[in-house]
Amino acid sequence: MGRLENKIAVVTGSATGIGAGTVKLFAKEGAIVICADINDDDNHKTVDEIISAGGKAEACHVDVSSEESVVEFANHLKEKYKHIDVLFNNAGVDAEGGKVHEYPVELFDKIHSVDLRGTFLMSKYLIPLMLGRRGSIINTSSMSGRAADLNRSGYNAAKGGVTNFTKGMAVDYAREGIRVNSISPGTIETPLIDSLAGTKEEESGRQFRETNKWITPLGRLGTPEDIGHLAVFLASDESAYLTGEDITIDGGIMA
Ligand code: NAI
């Protein structure tokens, strides 16, 4: 019997990176995984892989930054599944914007609309599917939510917001048996890193990875599965007494 046997788990940003790694682990542990992303091609590939391996999954086109899209998704879930047990708010975007006086307003709004507002919208409209039963919400912050990055203050602000939003939600819903925690990953090898620093093949990307390995006490970048294993624990009943916590998982950088 899996650790998430028959739990209905919604994961946003499931098409690539941390989300794709996590949904496969969720499915292996027996969850019915609903994969929500705007990248339909990669999302369908992820779901096909799960189904070929004998797991249960569904791909849904959801833009977490759009209230209309999230409401439509919530209605679909209510009709098809009646309730959900787990919500992993993982979808996120990041980019360098420069110092604040140069930072494009559109980029600040974009990062906030996906990373912070998206977490709010998904929680607001999916929590009703958890009320009256226990549930676990996992939000995705970052070590960038606790410490600064050069030229990425908009991301620092959004992820700092996610960490504290998590705490507010945890207190609001503790008596309802809904636990809310956040994960703060360090540097994880995903397409987001490719877009931020360059791919492994590019000189800038190669240097970025070398520097990050060097500053990480465990001596390597994280993998999507490193984060996925923590998400399995937070989604499962093994973490039944854990709520309102932000867990850093960064190979020791912040130690
Ligand atoms: P990724 O770029 O591989 O995955 C992000 C996913 O979110 C993609 O599948 C993308 O299509 C989806 N997405 C973007 N906007 C969306 C929207 N409006 N609605 C629905 N889906 C949307 O990146 P990665 O690294 O897997 O990121 C996952 C989360 O982890 C993000 O919240 C990111 O900020 C966070 N994170 C990543 C770190 C890293 O080093 N890779 C470090 C700390 C946090």
Image (cartoon, helix red, strand yellow):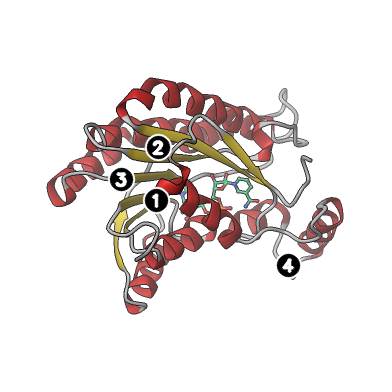
Q: Which residue is mark 2?
A: 65
How crowded pointer 3 is (Cα within 10 Å; few <14, some 14-19, many 20+) is rated as many
Which residue sits at x=43%, y=56%? Answer: 14
Residue 15 lies, in percent from the top left, at 44, 60
Report helix, strand or loop for mark 1.
Answer: strand
Task: Estimate the spatial distance between the alpha carbons at disc 1 and disc 3, rounded to whole Å.
Answer: 11 Å
Q: Earlier in the sequence, mark 4 or mark 1?
A: 1
Nearer to us: label 1 or label 3: 3
Task: Estimate the spatial distance between the alpha carbons at disc 2 and disc 4, rounded to whole Å.
Answer: 30 Å
Which residue sits at x=34%, y=66%? Answer: 1
The amino acid type found where label 4 is placed reads Lys
The amino acid type found where label 1 is placed reads Val
Task: Estimate the spatial distance between the alpha carbons at disc 4 and disc 1, rounded to whole Å.
Answer: 27 Å
How crowded pointer 2 is (Cα within 10 Å; few <14, some 14-19, many 20+) is rated as many
Q: Nearer the viewer, residue 99 or 156?
A: 156
Ligand 1 neighbours mark 4 (CB distance < 8 Å):
no
**Residue 174 falls in which quadrant of the image?**
top left
Q: Earlier in the sequence, mark 3 or mark 4?
A: 3
Q: Which residue is mark 1?
A: 11
Q: Is residue 251 left or right of residue 41?
A: right
* Disc sitting over residue 20 in the figure: none
Q: Nearer the viewer, residue 147 or 181?
A: 181
The amino acid type found where label 2 is placed reads Ser
Task: Estimate the spatial distance between the alpha carbons at disc 3 and disc 2, rounded to whole Å.
Answer: 22 Å
Which residue sits at x=29%, y=37%? Answer: 126
Q: Which residue is mark 4?
A: 200
Residue 9 lies, in percent from the top left, at 33, 51
Q: Which residue is mark 3?
A: 85
Asked if residue 138 is positioned above or below residue 194 in the image, the reply reads above
